[in-house]
Amino acid sequence: MSFRHFKQVMLCGFLSCSSCMHLNVPPARLEFVSIDRVNSSYYDLRFTSDRNLVDLYKAHGREGQIGTWIHCSLNGDPDFSIEHTIVLEASGIVSSMRLIEGDRRYEMLAAISVENHALDDGRNYVRPSELIQILKPQQYVPCKAVITAFPFVAYYSKVMYVPASRFIHAIESPWLAPARISLEFSQQPRSLLPFASVCIVRWRYDPAGGYDHIDRLGSCSDVPYAGMLASFAPYTTKLKIVSGSEQAPEPFAAYTILRGDGRQEPGIADENGRTHEVGASEYEVVKILINAQMNVVERWTKWTDSIP
C-alpha cells in the first residue's frame, strides 16, 4: 500500500471517530537544521523539536500512536489539517530521532518527496527543474509535523520555515550515486590503470539542461573499511537489535546493514544482539534491515556516541 493510500485509509478512520480524544500537550516548536538531496526523488530533511515527536504519546502515558509525518506547503496553502490535501507539497515520515545532549531538544530526520496532487495523468512527481521554478519566488517554505494516534484527534506542531534558498541549493548540489553503477569500457575515461573498473561515484543536477549528469568517477574496488578492515577505520560502531515493546536484545538475529552509499553488509547478531563492527572514514547515515517482527534501530548520531 502506498503512503498516499495509507493516508486516505487513516483519514477515513479519523473522520468517522465521533468520540476522539485530545492529547493535552502544547504544539511542539520546530527549527530547521538542514536539507540534503538523496536521489532524484527524495530529500533528507533534518529539524529539531522541543518534544519527542516519535514517542510523544508514550511519553505522556498514552498508547496508539500510528506515525509522525512532516508536511511542507509549496504553494502558500496554510491548511495542514489531515482533512485537507495541499496541492503542491513536500512530505514524508519522520524515521529517526536523537536527543541533543544538554539541550533537551530532539533532532529528527525525515525523507521527504515532492508531489503535485493536481496532476491526474498518473505522474504527480515534481521534476527538479520544476521544483526550482516553484521555489525561486519564495523566501521560506512553511512546514508542520502531524501525529496521528488512535483514538485521538491529530496532533499538530507549530509552523517551521525552511529557507527556499537552502532547498534550491540541495537540488543543485552533488549527490552520491547508488552503489556499483559501472561504466562500459568504451565509456570509461583514459587513465593510468586502463583495465581497472570505473564506477560513477557522484551525480550533479544541471539546472540549465534539466537533468542529472556525472559529477565524479572513481574506482569500483575502492570500498573503504569493509569486512575485517572495519576495525582500522577512524570511526567504528556496532548497532544493537531489539525486539518487542520492552526493547529486549535479540540474539543471533539475521540482519543486513545498509551503508550510506548503498552497499549492503549482511550478518548474524551476537548473543547480546550486537551487529558486526561497522567502520567509516567520516560521518555516515546507516540503516539496519531485520525481520519484520522486530524493531529497527537506525543510528545517525556521531560514530563515537555509545549505543543505548
Image (tube, rainbow, N blue to C red):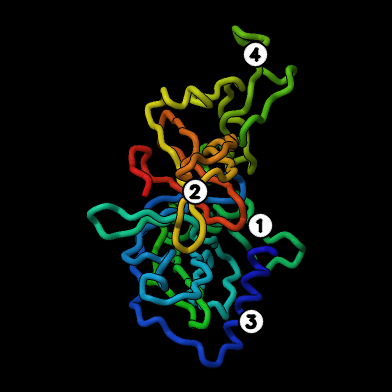
The span from disc 3 to disc 1 (Cα, nearest Å) is 24 Å
Q: Earlier in the sequence, mark 2 or mark 4?
A: 4
Residue that numbered label 4 is attached to = 196
The type of residue carrying mark 2 is Ile
Q: Is residue 104 above or below residue 305?
A: below
* Left or right position of 232 against 217: left
Residue that numbered label 1 is attached to = 125
Q: Earlier in the sequence, mark 2 or mark 3?
A: 3
Element type where label 3 sits in the image? helix
Q: Residue 55: which disc?
A: none
The type of residue carrying mark 1 is Tyr
Q: Are marks 2 and 4 in contact (CB under 8 Å)?
A: no
The type of residue carrying mark 3 is Cys
Name of the residue lying farthest toward the top = 192
The span from disc 1 to disc 2 (Cα, nearest Å) is 35 Å
Q: Is residue 5 above or below residue 187?
A: below
The span from disc 2 to disc 4 (Cα, nearest Å) is 38 Å
Q: Residue at x 46, y 27 (%)?
A: 230
Q: Position of residue 146 (x, y in %)?
A: 47, 71
Residue that numbered label 3 is attached to = 12
Q: Nearer the viewer, mark 2 or mark 3?
A: 2
Q: Is residue 106 among the parts visible in the rendering?
A: yes
Q: Residues within 10 Å of mark 2 (few under 14, many from 20)?
A: many
